[in-house]
Image (cartoon, helix red, strand yellow):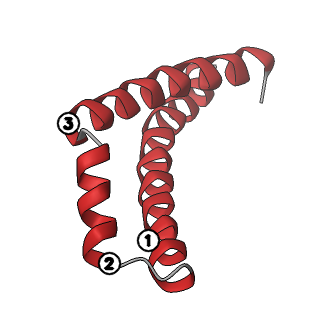
Amino acid sequence: LRRVVAPRFWAGFISMPLLSLIFVAVGIWGGAIVGVDWKGIDEGFFWASMQGAVEWQKDLVNCFIKSVVFAITVTWIALFNGY
């Protein structure tokens, strides 16, 4: 049982925070495309507003902590139920 559970736990524990990082990057990039290309907002204004609205250190730490907690919770429940 240990041979089956441990690799699945570590795979979920590692992959979910990485997926969260990718999704955040794609979301910011998508916002830039919609704002700059489709809506005609100045690119410098968009990135200046983004930097002003987002507290990078606080928000990234919060995102990382939540993704790790969710990774542990979801992976543990999935392993407990046999998936």
Residue identifier under label 3: 57
Mark 2 to mark 3 CA distance (whole Å): 23 Å
Q: Taking 16 as reference, is 28 above or below it?
A: below
Q: Residue at x 31, y 45 (%)?
A: 53
Disc ID at residue 43? 2
**Quadrant of the image for the N terminus?**
top right
Mark 1 to mark 2 CA distance (whole Å): 8 Å
| Discs 1, 2 touching: Cβ within 8 Å | yes
Kindly identify the amino acid type of the residue bearing the numbered disc 3. Gln
| Residue 25 sits in quarter | bottom left
Q: Nearer the viewer, mark 1 or mark 2?
A: 2
76 sits left or right of 45 in the view: right
| Residue 22 sits in quarter | bottom left
Instruction: Decide which of 60, 43 is in the foreground and name it.
Output: 43
> In the rendered picture of this protein, how many numbered marks are placed on residues?
3
Residue identifier under label 1: 32
Instruction: Decide which of 1, 66 is in the foreground and name it.
Output: 66
Instruction: Decide which of 51, 56 is in the foreground and name it.
Output: 51
Kindly identify the amino acid type of the residue bearing the numbered disc 1. Ala
| Residue 64 sits in quarter | top left
First of labels 2, 3 by sequence position:
2
Kindly identify the amino acid type of the residue bearing the numbered disc 2. Glu
